[in-house]
Image: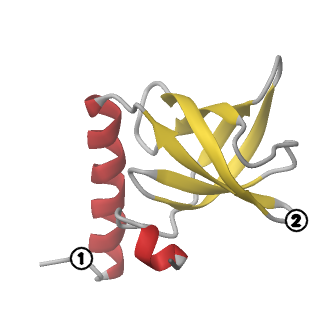
Amino acid sequence: MSNVERRIHRRAPVQVQGFLSGNSHEIEAVTLDLSVGGARFECDLEVYPGKVIRVRLALPGAVEPLSIEAARVQWVGEDTFGVSFQNVRSAELDELEQLIDEYEEAEGTGHA
């Protein structure tokens, strides 16, 4: 099964500042793309497939970063890796969906 077939969420190439925690310290990162189900990060945090990390995203206009307590690393590249969000609360899902909708509207790629 290809990656495209496995993806069930719309993914947008949105760049958002993130803060990732793998163990005891937090490190800055940036998303290269984002969906309600996961993200691709550019970061030098040492991770491996299956590792669960904490993600905080500084969404535009938000007072507090959006916090996702469990994101499972799916794959690792040279300076990038992909995560799937686990057990995300509905309020966070709504914020992610709104950000993706706004991006698609701005790019003229919105779905009818």
Q: Position of residue 2 (x, y in %)?
A: 53, 79
Q: In this view, does 43 lie to the left or right of 36?
A: right
Indicate which label's residue lies in the foreground, 2 or 1: 2
Of callouts 2 and 1, the N-terminal one: 2
Task: Identify the amino acid type marked 2.
Answer: Glu
Spot the residue most to the left: 112
Residue positioned 60% across, 34% down in the render: 55
Residue positioned 29% across, 82% down in the render: 109
Q: Where is residue 67 in the image (x, y as percent from the top left)?
A: 50, 28
Residue positioned 74% across, 49% down in the render: 49
Q: Is residue 35 above or below residue 18?
A: below
Which residue, given by chain and number where applicable, does mark 2 sit on? 78
Residue 110: mark in rendering: 1
Q: Position of residue 103 (x, y in %)?
A: 36, 66
Q: How crowded is mark 1: few (under 14 residues within 10 Å), some or many (20 or more)?
A: few
Q: Describe the colour scheme in one phrase.
A: secondary structure
Task: Identify the amino acid type marked 1.
Answer: Gly
Q: In which quarter of the image is residue 106?
A: bottom left
Spot the residue most to the bottom: 108
Q: Is residue 44 left or right of residue 3?
A: right
Residue 43: mark in rendering: none
Q: Quadrant of residue 107?
A: bottom left
Q: Residues within 10 Å of mark 2 (few under 14, many from 20)?
A: few
Marks 2 and 1, how far apart in space?
Answer: 32 Å
Q: Is residue 46 above or below residue 75?
A: above
Q: Is residue 25 left or right of residue 13?
A: right
Q: Is residue 82 above or below residue 67?
A: below
Residue positioned 50% across, 77% down in the render: 1
